[in-house]
Image (cartoon, coloured by chain):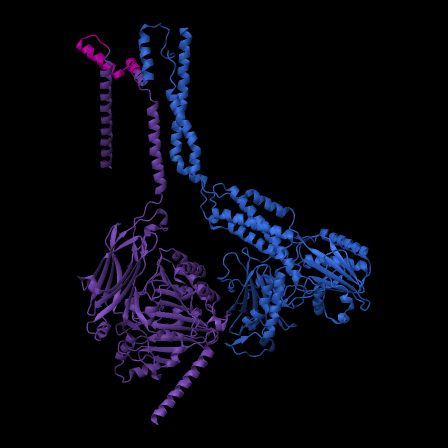
Amino acid sequence: MSLFKSNFLLFLVLLFTTTACVSIAADELNEEFTEALLLRPLPDRKVLAHFHFQSSVPPTPSYGRHHHIFPKSIYQLVHKFQVREMELSFTQGRWNYERWGGYDPISSGNAKPPGVELWADFDVPGNQVDDSWKNLTHALSGLFCASINFLEHSTTYSAPQWNFRSFSGKLRYGTLPREAVCTENLTPWLKLLPCRDKGGLSALMDRPSIYRGYYHSQRLHLKSDEFDTSKSSSGIVLEQTLTVVLQPNSLGTGETLSGKMLQPSWSLDSLFGRKVRGKCSLSKSSNVYVQFEQNLVSELKNLWKSEESTSEILIHEGFQKNPIFEMPSSPKRVIKEVKNLRTGESILYEFSVEDYDEYEQFDVGLRWKMPVIWSSQQAPLRASRFLMGSGNERGAIAISLKSSGSNIVQRAGREGKECRLRVDIFQVVPWYVKVYYHTLEVFVDGHLQSTIDNIEKIRVSPSEDKVSPGLMEVVLGLPCSVKSAALTLEFDKGFLHIDEYPPDANQGFDIPSAIVSFADFQTNMSFDDVSLKSLPILSKLQERSQVLSYTEVLLVPLTTPDFSMPYNVITITCTVFALYFGSLLNALRRRVGEEERLLNRKAGNKTGPLALMLSKLSAKLRGRPWEPPEPPSSTQSNSNYKLIAKVVLVAGVAAAWQFYFNTS
Amino acid sequence: MAEISDPLLTSTSDSQNSEPEFDQDTMRKTKPGLKRFALTLTVLLSFLLGLPLLLKSVEIYRSPLPFREIDELSAAIESDTVLFPCRFRAVFVDFGGSVFTANELSLSIESDVRKLATRGYTSCGACSYNTSVSVTLDSGSDCVHSGSDLNWKCGKLKNDESFGKYDDELLDDYLRSLLDDNGGSSNGGKVYSVIVVRTEEEEEVRAVVGKYRHAWIIGKVSKEEALKKVAEIFVKVFVNGGKDEGSISGEFMPVGADGRIVLSFNLLNADPRDWHYDWDFQAVDDNLLAPIIEALKPLAEFRVESQVLYHTPKSSFSYWDDKMGSHIFSTNDLPFFVNSNEWHLDTSAAAGGRSKILHFVVYVPSSTECPLLLKLPNGEISATNGFISPMWGSVIVWNPSACLKDAELEPHVRHKIPPEDLRKIFEVFTGQLRQLFGLKSRGFFGDALGTSRLLTSDRGFTEWELDMLSRQHTCFNLLQCGTTLGSLSRLVQSLPRMIIKDEIGKQVKYSLEAARLALSNVSNGVYDASAVSSRQARSFAEDAFYHPSMMSVSYYSFEHCFAVYSPFFLPVSLHVLLAALREWKRYKQESKKYHAWRAISK
């Protein structure tokens, strides 16, 4: 009986889920747009603002080609180049992993290397991938007013095999570290939103305040399974995010309480200088979240130990009257992360923009009443990269990994017998930095280790001059107790052809950021409420993603020629040739006999007057009759005399010079 | 050296034992040597000979372009306008008469046609009027033809009982079956016919131009009047498309240089906070646009796109009119209606290169300016509530019913434009598309001899209109191709140091070939093929003209060449020239000396 009952229940459940699925499928056959903004106070008195917009369109066969929300240009792009997945980011500034965190979904998904980063996965036959990539770069550079078309050349992009997301081999990856990012890139990005910056949360994007920030990254990620033949395709999903780190304006900065500095208070108005006037009328949901990260929450609990149920108060009504912080408007709901072992729990306060309009403007803020000090969660190892060596000939790249001191690694290690920490490194080097991959050395805790012991997997595709960049994909297996590790690679600096130098070549050349990821560590937030999955920003936060960080961009100075050199060389060579030619011609024309004869005649005619006088004088002195001096000897003495006179003159000038400069 | 030492020896030996009048400075006893002079001259000459070689070596590659043929082509196109052969025929039912009268009628129609043609009705792509007009006289029982190749089903119309009951649309199809028109695809151009039926029953004379290639006149009409009318329909309607003087001239054919047109349909919601509308574009595309595009296929390659945009206010203000109960936008402000800042219509990845994009915009005003009406200069309200902008596209203002009813609409909800409204909008768009192509948007053609009705096709364009368009299109393509190639050849000839790649030469060659093919097709009267090949000709010509290598700065200037080579050639040539001059001078001087000695010694 009980078996039957349970079977019946199971059947009922199945029935319900299938009907639910059907109804969802019927509902889903529509375009959707959602907007959200996540704000998070950062430990170093700054505020992170993360805008998240998502538009999705059902697959073409069932929905058709006409869209009322999804941007036409992106749809055409996806169909023209058969893009399966693509991510484009424009970033200014560098994400500070140490202070702003390196172990949360936002930092591993939205911290991007400076400049432009583009990767795309295509759904075309293998031999057409490069062509698609080239066309895509041109289309994107037109669309976003950026020089993404520089990624067209095969020296600028690479095809990662397994370390960077892909296993299909149809992925291409390229970066432009020096691309400047400004409003001309933001405006076309905003054009893809149905409301642009005319309504909804994007109205907050006041250009001066956004670009005044410490970090600015605008990102576009699209995923399509339009070309899959299977029925379960979900169409195209376009995700646009803008992540900025701002310094709140002096709203109570410098306020101190019992000797400690208060965290700055802020509101949307003070951060952006604008207010939200209602939601974008096309968006399905429009929410603002304020996030307190795990460490902050536990710090707040510590501060408030006297009370019993701190977390309850943080969540429920009492929160308005709590002694630590204050929010001007109360949240619609509070979402608490499920407690898990590895990380603590973070809290999200949700505010809805829906009910506000032109007359009742929406604002969210945070005012601290007590000084709070906390630090963000760190990735297991902190990666940085630098150059070694000097001179214009050779050098070495070093990637150093330092333990961040968090105890995540130990905790992760407890599970296995021999604990290894897996670190994936993905590094692209331009061809003019000629890396010798055999010089790869691994140092663990300052001691040189054999590479075989520590490298689990490696793939190297060496650079080819003027054809392709060098690519290195490494999986390191480090002992869990590692304090610091380093990887060094030696390289020679190559020479470029004179017309391959970019303008301002003396500034140096950039080596794009390396990507360091920790495959064993996944970051996500987990909420117990299933309904939260329907909100794209929350489902994005709940998605499991690898912890990864980008290293610094390196600046390699190369020997730069004098760019007027070709003309100088031409001029000098031509002059030498002309001199040679002229003297040769003169030598050919020379009449030696005639010249001698003329010289003789001249010598016979006249000797110098001084010599004449001298000889006459000597004759008188000796009492002998004067006779003209022998011409050869006279010329001899004459030239001697001239030589002496010259030497004296030079010496005199030198002495005068010396004297003059000494006195003055 | 021997040459020098010889005179030296002789002179020293001579100076001792020869006669005293020999002066060493002014005379010499030996002939002056030519060795050094010859040497310097050889160097100079070899330099001069080497100069062309050098110039050849620094020469840049220029693909040989057929300049002469280009000139011939543009001369051929420009001198006499491209004229197509067309054939006309007239059928007179119930007029009586014999073969003689048929021929007479034919001649008189021809003379009328030519008279009209000389009065300025020969535009580009018109018909040549030197073909004869064939006339058939149908008297019910038997027919009299003036030509031979006519296939009019004789006597059928007269005997048909139900003839008077047909309305125009049905009559059109019925007459087509009578004419037994085999598509007019026979060699020598399309056949256009006018059928004149004299009936005593109807007092007024009705002239109707059908959807195909024929027109008819029914009523109590005299022979002279009928002849004039027939000639007029031939020239003004069939050949010139019934254009008014004020309409857009055919030179503004909105076809891209690569023969493509992108029709971009945009629905603009001025302020989605009040309401926002969507449309069922898919259905419109399938039902209304597809036939039009199918019909226009010979003219260009069409592509249809659609999008819905929000927050797109117009850029000029309207004023409230109490009498109308609506906001009025006067026609004088139309140039400021399109808001190029906020209307981002132009992002199309599909329209690469030199395709032409025509924008069709439906503007949904916000609640603060609704209903919005356009006022014509004469004070009336525009019936279509839209306007066109030649070569750009058109705009229609659509007022949602909500603003008329003053009902409260729930905001943030997507509404759909009702299908009947959408149908109306696209009918206006069709008319506007016709206008953009230079055709009339109204179904009447009127002039001194009364008005004639023009039947419209549900494809938007009737067959004779398409013929006219494709004739015009061919003609303008050829003209454009001629001018492009002409300016290319002028440009290339004026810049002698510009690199011209082989590819450009090839494109010019293909373009010329296609243009020649188009011209021969024109003279044979094959409309569609000539339109296609003329499009190719133009596209190749434009490709050649806008080739990236022509645009680049690879123009290797003479100044650059001079700057590179002068450091060598300037000093060397100075040396060589001076040496040659000196040697020449010396030789002259020395030979003078010798002659002086010779004169003395004699």
Q: Is residue B93 left or right of residue B318?
A: right
Residue B461 pos. (x, y %): 64, 63
Q: Is residue A625 magenta?
A: yes
- Magenta span: chief secondary structure: helix
A601 or A571: nearer the viewer: A571
Q: Is residue A67 magenta?
A: no
Quadrant housing the N terminus of chain A: bottom left
B78 or A523: nearer the viewer: B78
- The chain drawn blue is chain what? B
A370 or A208: nearer the viewer: A208
For the point 36% across and 92% down, the residue is A4
Residue B133 pos. (x, y %): 74, 55
Picture quarter containing residue A339? bottom left
Q: Is residue A287 left or right of residue B266?
A: left
Picture quarter containing residue A435? bottom left
Residue A455 showing in the rendered view: yes
Q: Is residue B328 left or right of residue B449?
A: left
Quadrant housing the C terminus of chain A: top left
Residue A262 showing in the rendered view: no
For the point 27% across and 67% down, the residue is A98
Chain A's shade in the image?
A: purple
Answer above or below: position of B557 versus A78.
Answer: above
Bounds of the magenta span? A600-627
Residue B17 pos. (x, y %): 32, 5
Residue A286 pos. (x, y %): 43, 75
